[in-house]
């Protein structure tokens, strides 16, 4: 009967079993995601509390790094809640929990074996929890292979996936074996971060196992490179929504990569307080930016304002360039005014500040236009079309020509599915 509802969907006014099962699965997954998020928050509070007795300084750089991983975990929690069948959300949450367990275990081990002579309970457990950084490293690249729907690209990649898991598990178990050699029947010694000293200077059989584990890093890097190449090739052939998802992911990955490279050149830990203010700001920004990959993954999967990614990239680049240029101009003007020209320091600083403020808008507009030409071409072409139409409108007085030009400009700039122009007849009262 036309318009009737199939009996397999609704029976007796109740939802079909298949829908009930999915609803229960969705509810259970949302509860699991909320529980893991709460667990991460508790671990974060515990880490902050333990760092004091462990004499591990809590710097702004530490908070920035934690904020980056919390952003990754929050994106994973949201993906797991909205799309529970997508494995990427659960992987990102596992990365966050592994990092937090590593930090908590390291701080507790340092407190126990460096300042309490091993008198605290579960000190040996904390030593092994400190190794949580290893599974975090092994899990974090998996979204590159599984993006965006949490499934393998094809059945041909199944053996690559299982081979990677085998290598990564062997790599992690190697460190566990070395750690066990430094715990079982030995006097436990840890460094200021809570890591076993034997992991840095293994001896005998432990040295052999440690070297074998380190040798597995090369095939792990090979797997990661293979997945990145696969993603780039896929990006070149994808169109539409899938291409925009990959843009989100690649933008986040590029920001994370740049920030990680910057972080390698900036001291951290106990040396953070001894570096210049500029280096401290750079360290904090690089630590925060290292979590951009997780945020890009979440945005791409959830498709939030998906087609604004070009706008986001162009705005980020333009403001970064403008900021760098204005900082350079400001420093140059201050140096010129206070060291070359006969101005007092307060007057030179004030004049330089006013000059930088006056340059902001003209510089921003020019840089934005140059960046849009490369990274937001649709907006650049649309603006060029509108400007050309406005220029022709000044010289054209024929109504029919103006109408056709207007329709052509709308089609070129907005690209609607259909466009029509309605004009009020001459002499009508409205």
Image (cartoon, grey):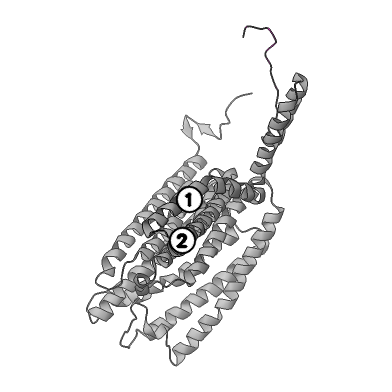
Label whose residue precedes the other's in the sequence (2 or 1): 2
In this view, the residue in front, 358 or 204, is 358
Q: Residue furthest bottom?
A: 204
Q: Is residue 17 above or below residue 338?
A: above
* x then y, percent, for residue 204: 44, 93
Q: Residue at x 53, y 84 (%)?
A: 212
Task: Return the residue at label 1.
Answer: 355
Residue interval drawn in magenta: 421-430
Mark 2–mark 1 CB contact (< 8 Å):
no
* x then y, percent, for residue 134: 46, 72
Q: Quadrant of the C terminus?
A: top right
Q: Considering the whole magenta stretch, tell me its main secondary structure.
A: loop
In this view, the residue in front, 110 or 292, is 292
Badge 1 marks a residue whose secondary structure is helix
> Which quadrant of the view contains residue 280?
bottom left
Q: Quadrant of the N terminus?
A: top right
Task: Return the residue at label 2.
Answer: 341
In this view, the residue in front, 407 or 337, is 337
* x then y, percent, for residue 81: 45, 48
Left or right of 318? Residue 202 is: left
């Amino acid at each position: 009967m036309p318009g009737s509802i199939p009996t397999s969907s609704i029976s007796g006014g109740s939802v079909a079993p298949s829908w009930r099962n999915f609803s229960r699965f969705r509810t259970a997954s949302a509860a699991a995601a909320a529980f893991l998020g709460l667990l991460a928050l508790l671990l974060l509070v515990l880490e902050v509390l333990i760092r004091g007795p462990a004499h591990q300084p809590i710097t702004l750089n530490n908070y920035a790094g934690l904020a980056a991983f919390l952003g990754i975990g929050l994106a994973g929690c949201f993906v797991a809640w909205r799309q529970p069948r997508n494995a990427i959300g659960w992987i990102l949450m596992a990365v966050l929990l592994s990092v937090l367990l590593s930090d908590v275990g390291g701080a507790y081990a340092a407190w126990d074996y460096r300042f309490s002579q091993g008198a605290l309970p579960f000190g040996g457990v904390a030593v092994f929890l400190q190794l949580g950084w290893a599974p975090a490293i092994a899990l974090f690249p998996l979204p590159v292979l599984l993006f965006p729907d949490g499934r393998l690209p094809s059945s041909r990649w199944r053996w690559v996936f299982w081979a990677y898991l085998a290598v990564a598990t062997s790599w992690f178990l190697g460190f566990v074996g070395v750690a066990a050699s430094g715990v079982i029947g030995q006097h436990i010694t840890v460094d200021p971060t809570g890591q076993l000293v034997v992991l840095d200077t293994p001896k005998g059989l432990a040295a052999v196992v440690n070297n074998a584990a380190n040798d597995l890093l090369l095939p792990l890097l090979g797997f990661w490179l293979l997945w990145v190449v696969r993603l780039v090739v896929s990006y070149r052939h994808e169109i539409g929504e899938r291409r925009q998802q990959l843009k989100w992911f690649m933008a986040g990955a590029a920001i994370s990569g740049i920030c990680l490279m910057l972080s390698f050149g900036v001291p951290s830990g106990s040396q953070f307080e001894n570096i210049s203010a500029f280096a401290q700001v750079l360290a904090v920004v690089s630590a925060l930016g290292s979590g951009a990959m997780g945020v890009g993954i979440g945005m791409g999967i959830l498709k939030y304002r998906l087609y604004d990614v070009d706008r986001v990239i162009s705005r980020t680049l333009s403001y970064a360039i403008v900021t760098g240029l204005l900082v350079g101009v400001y420093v140059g003007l201050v140096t010129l005014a206070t060291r070359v020209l006969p101005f007092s320091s307060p007057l030179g600083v004030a004049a330089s500040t006013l000059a930088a403020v006056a340059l902001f808008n003209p510089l921003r507009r020019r840089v934005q236009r140059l960046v849009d030409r490369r990274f937001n071409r649709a907006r650049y072409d649309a603006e060029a079309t509108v400007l050309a139409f406005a220029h022709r409108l000044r010289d054209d007085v024929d109504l029919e020509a103006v109408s056709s030009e207007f329709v052509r400009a709308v089609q070129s700039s907005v690209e609607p599915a259909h466009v029509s122009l309605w004009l009020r007849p001459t002499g009508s009262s409205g």
